[in-house]
Image (cartoon, grey):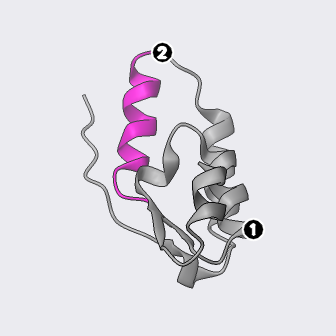
Amino acid sequence: MERLIKKFSSLIFIMPHMFYPRLNEALYLLENYGNVYVDTINIFSAILQDEQKGLNRDKEREILLNSQQMEQEDVFWHRSSCRYK
């Protein structure tokens, strides 16, 4: 992905679902390239669904919480509908 972002530097890249589950990569690209934005739609429900399947997503939760301190104009925050059993 980084190779494409460098090659097409005049193009805007919007990473859907915050590039889940590769959140670290999404944040790296966001912090290092002015043409990268992330979208958080469904990220919260994706984490919850994974946890309901028994997957540990503590690391992803921590990354997501830390990312909320970033410059807000680079992140499109959305509410996700979450279903609980």
What residue do we see at 43% from left, 26% from top? 50
Point out the stretch of residues depicted in magenta.
40-54
Is label 2 in a helix, a strand or a loop? loop
What residue do we see at 40% from left, 17% from top? 53
Q: Which residue is mark 2?
A: 54
Nearer-the-camera pick, 41 or 37: 37
| Mark 1 burial class by Cα count in 10 Å: few <14, some 14-19, many 20+ | few
What residue do we see at 42% from left, 48% from top? 44
Is label 1 in a helix, a strand or a loop? helix
Q: Amino acid at mark 1?
A: Asn
Nearer-the-camera pick, 64 or 18: 18
Residue 28 % position (x, y): 73, 57
Find out whether the residues at labels 2 and 1 contact each other: C-beta distance under 8 Å.
no
Verify whether residue 52 appears in magenta.
yes
Nearer-the-camera pick, 1 or 85: 1
Residue 49 % position (x, y): 36, 30
Q: Is residue 74 left or right of residue 81?
A: right
Residue 69 % position (x, y): 69, 72
